[in-house]
Amino acid sequence: MKVLIIYSTKGGVSRQCAEMLADKLYSSMEVSLYDIKNDPPSPEGFDVAVIGGSIRMGRLNKKLKSYIIDNADLLSHMNTAIYLCCGFTESFDDYVTIQIPKSVTASLGIHCFGGELKPEKLRGLDKLIVKMVRSSLKTEDIDFPDENRSPLPEIVPENIYRLADKIRALL
């Protein structure tokens, strides 16, 4: 089975998630991994397409979103999964509603892989914004502790492995 994984990344989180997914599939499938900035191939000829990226400032990468729109018909007629990496997982449903084109049916689901807020992976204004958000979250956690919420966003490996299991079940 041939699997196409396309991702967009700025700080490396979406790439890390794509690589974790690919590592779970390599032993039983032919996996092709592409960063959207390197002009990935059409999903035609693949059995499964997985497309993912980070939500930054409430938006999905423009080039990734265009790829999804341009290939909507093909993606909707094949085994397709979409994943989002977002630091604010409580907003996941809103991100899906606003950022994923309605014309795409993801037969394998739309998944939240969590996210990270690590300023050391960023530069410039992005780094400053992430530092401010992290500072705010830490203060919030001290002032209003909530044992059900992690103090800082994290990647959720279980969600990645769950998608890998869904894909392997197609064999």
Image: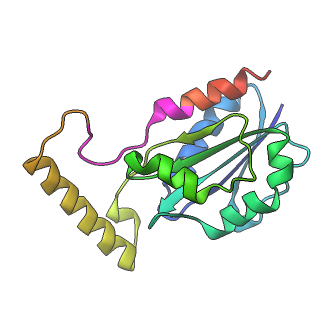
Q: At 35% from the left edge and 57% from the top edge, which residue is drawn?
A: 117
Residue closest to the far right? 45
Vertical placement of residue 60 versus 170, above or below: below
Q: Is residue 13 left or right of residue 147?
A: right
Q: Quadrant of the C terminus?
A: top right
Q: At 59% from the left edge and 44% from the top edge, which residue is drawn?
A: 19
Q: At 47% from the left edge and 48% from the top edge, which residue is drawn?
A: 92
Q: Residue 150 at what x, y percent from top left? A: 27, 40
Q: Is residue 156 on the magenta stretch?
A: yes
Q: Quadrant of the N terminus?
A: top right
* Frontmost residue, 22 versus 151: 151
* Frontmost residue, 78 versus 7: 78
How many numbered marks are there? 0
- Magenta: main secondary structure: loop
Q: Is residue 69 left or right of residue 98?
A: right
Q: Which residues are magenta?
A: 149-160
* Frontmost residue, 59 versus 26: 59
Q: At 74% from the left edge and 43% from the top edge, which residue is drawn?
A: 105
* Frontmost residue, 29 versus 152: 152
Q: Residue 65 at what x, y percent from top left? A: 67, 62
Q: Residue 122 at what x, y percent from top left? A: 40, 68
Vertical placement of residue 14 versus 80, above or below: below
Q: Residue 39 at what x, y percent from top left? A: 77, 65
